[in-house]
Image (cartoon, rainbow, N blue to C red):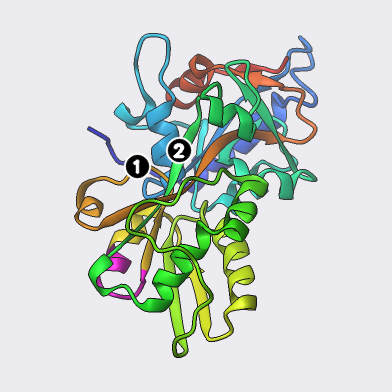
Amino acid sequence: MKKRVMALGLAATVGVFGMAALAGCNGGEEDTGVKYITTAIMRKANSGTRGAFDELVVNSEGKALEDLTLTGAWLTEVDQTGTVITTIAGKTSFLGYISMGSVDANKDKIKAVKVNGVEGTVANVLSGEYELSRPFNLIYEADTLSDAAKNFLSYIYSEDGAAIVNTEWIAVEKPAGVADYTPYSGSAETVQLTGSTSLQPMIEVLAESYMKENENVTIKWGGGGSGEALAAVKDGSADFGMISREAKDGELDYTVTEVARDGIAVIVDKNCPLTEVTFDQLYDLYANGTKIECK
């Protein structure tokens, strides 16, 4: 059973930054020359990226991060994908994880490292070689979904929509029950999507392309994590809830549709010499604060 994560206090965070300065991967420990990753950046408990990462990172003894209460001076918890990037940028002893689709746009700040010897690419996710991957799902009330919302969903699986998805993510086949796409011809409507910040870059590009072709529809998106999706669909404030992991619990009471697949990239500062990590190293860093040698 998953346990909630306790957030760090300010004093612990300050202590972590001090330690990083002494043992960073761009300067190392002056007396030994050894360079280490010392600080792990993680998302908050309601994040779909966090849920998927904790579930997928299983060490050689079969222990998963999701079974632990993660606390410690080596951990820093943040709320969004962008905050992970800005927290790591310029700090070469820091390591974290984000959606694979958000790496290219931030290559001036961070880089992705190999996981278990495999590079995080679309081809490697599709082949199953890259083990840190998860679904991008939308949850919704099918019986009350507006015509405009249905039309936008169809667009995601259209030839143009799939081409957009495949630029940084992985398109999937259109499921049964979703109509073939044709331009929207109804009255003016607004479609709201709320939830995962990992889905938002993809939804933004899809929405902007869709709205150029369908001027009567306004697509809006937002939210601070997958944990907000269910409540927004329940109270009617969103047509779609965005979750960047497998659906669970009350989410399964609604229609769940996979709109893409994504890899989770393990990232460090662009100047950090670290090139790859294993699941064992990730587990030990997040669970126990065990430093990772940069090599």
Residue at the image point whose x is 46% and y is 21% from the top: 283
Q: Is residue 107 left or right of residue 258?
A: right
The reply to whether residue 294 is visible in this rendering is yes
| Res. 110 image quadrant | top right
- Bounds of the magenta segment: 231-239
Work out whether 178 lies above or below 55: below
Identified by mark 2, the residue type is Arg
Q: Report x, y in % for residue 60.
A: 42, 9
Q: Amino acid at mark 1?
A: Glu
Q: Is residue 28 left or right of residue 236?
A: right
Q: Is residue 237 magenta?
A: yes
Residue 246, label in figure: 1
| Disc 2: CA contacts within 10 A as few (<14), some (14-19) or many (>=20) | many
In terms of depth relative to the viewer, which is nearer, 138 or 31? 138
Q: Position of residue 186 (x, y in %)?
A: 44, 86
Residue located beneath label 2 in the image = 134
- Residue 275 is left or right of residue 97, and the answer is right
Q: Secondary structure at mark 2?
A: strand
The front one of 272 and 10 is 272
Image quadrant of residue 293?
A: top right
Residue 166 higher or lower than 17, as above or below: below
Tag 2 near tag 1, CB within 8 Å:
yes
- Report the residue at 66% width, 25% height from top: 119
The crowding category of the residue bearing disc 1, from other C-alpha atoms within 10 Å (few below 14, some 14 to 19, many at least 20), is some
Across and down, in percent, residue 29 comes to 74, 18
Left or right of 168 in this view: 281: left
